[in-house]
Image (tube, helix red, strand yellow):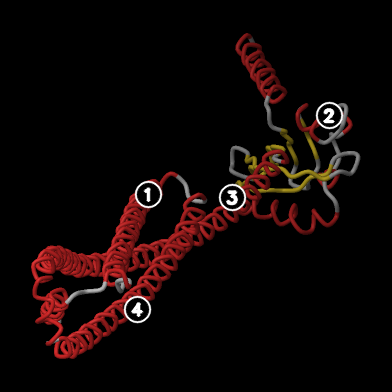
Amino acid sequence: MHNVIAAHKRIVRALWCLAKITEQAGEGIAVLDLNGTIQFVNATWTKMHGYNTRHELVGKQISTFHTKEQMERDVIPFIEEVKRRGQLTGPIEHMRKDGTPFLTEMKMIVVRDESGQSIGLIGFVTDITERKRAEEHLKQQTAELTAANEKLQQQVGEREQAETQWQEHRSQLEQRIEEQTAELTAVNEKLQHEIAERDQREEKLRQHYNQIEEQIAELTSANEKLQQQVGEREQAETQWQEHRSQLEQRIEEQTAELTATNEKLQQQVGEREQAETQWQEHRSQLEQRIEQQTAELTAVNEKLQHEIAERDQREEKLRQHYNQLEEQIAELTAANEKLQQQVGQLEQSEETMLESILEAEKPRGEAGRFNPQELRALSELAKRLA
């Protein structure tokens, strides 16, 4: 008798512990018979389905927590599969007392007696509404991130394509600048060569001018000597009168020779002026070409600066390279200005020399008429000039 009481107490104690465990469990727990009638539910199951006490649920069918559609579609097939397999876990939609549906994860186990016969079912239910909502939100975020990633990859591809196009454009610009720099260098070298030739012509003209000055000095000396001889020959005036006709004829011949020499010299001056005009036209063409190339370089420079301004720090090296090109263009421009200044100086020097030559070739007035000795000296000078 004592053993029976002790055993009964252990059973009561075990049942009490089991009841406490079911009451404190975070899952909804329901015990059903094989017909689906509720034998027991814990507080979590009761609260989860919107009821106040579990006593109002005991004796009701499992269909209390489902719609007809849910029973036919999900619950009945689920219970049949549990009976066949012994246990099963899966998502089952439930319905609260107020009629609102909610999704659960349900685990159902077949309860067997000592002989192994099925005597009931135990269901463990977890409300996964929030988890499902979180999963849906996560799926939505994943889809959005996937779309954003695809869009980003597309933008990256477009950016790489734009970068490739810009690299090609930059290569074309650099090639164009190099070509224009080479053209300017060639024009500069050609202009320097022409200036060197101009210097040579200038030197020859200077030498010719020095020769003319020497001849004028010789002529002046001869004139003084002739004047001295005039004084000495006044005593021989009588003899000179006899030969005056011959001398006058001779003077006319020498005058004709001097006139021819003067015309030839004027012709040479005209040819020189024509050559000067042609050189001026050639210089104007060169200046116009240099201005056009400078304008093209300026336009290219402005376009390149605008494109570089839209680039980030990765293009700093290109900006430095472009600054070096600008410095080269500035140096070429300065060299061009220096060459133009030299051309101006050469023009001024040439004009001065031409004025000196023209001043030296002016005919002498009546008061400075040559005597026979002067005419002989002039004739000799004309022959030397010819």
Q: Secondary structure at mark 1?
A: helix
Quarter of the rendering containing residue 248: bottom left
Q: Secondary structure at mark 2?
A: helix
Give the CA distance from mark 2 to mark 3. Answer: 46 Å
Upstream in sequence: badge 4 or badge 1: 4
Quarter of the rendering containing residue 229: bottom left
**Three-letter amino acid code at the position of disc 2:** Arg
Q: Which label sits in the foreground, 2 or 1?
A: 1
Residue 330: image location, x then y, percent: 36, 52
Give the CA distance from mark 4 to mark 2. Answer: 121 Å
> Contact (CB < 8 A) between labels 3 and 4?
no
Q: Which mark is residue 323?
A: 1
**Three-letter amino acid code at the position of disc 4:** Gln
Report whether 255 appears left or right of 337. left
Q: Which label sits in the foreground, 1 or 3?
A: 1
Per the image, the residue denoted by label 3 is 145
> Where 92 sits versus 255, above or below?
above
Per the image, the residue denoted by label 2 is 54
Per the image, the residue denoted by label 4 is 278
Q: Between residue 385 and residue 3, name the one nearer to us.
A: 385
Q: Secondary structure at mark 3?
A: helix
> Where 153 sits versus 33, above or below?
below
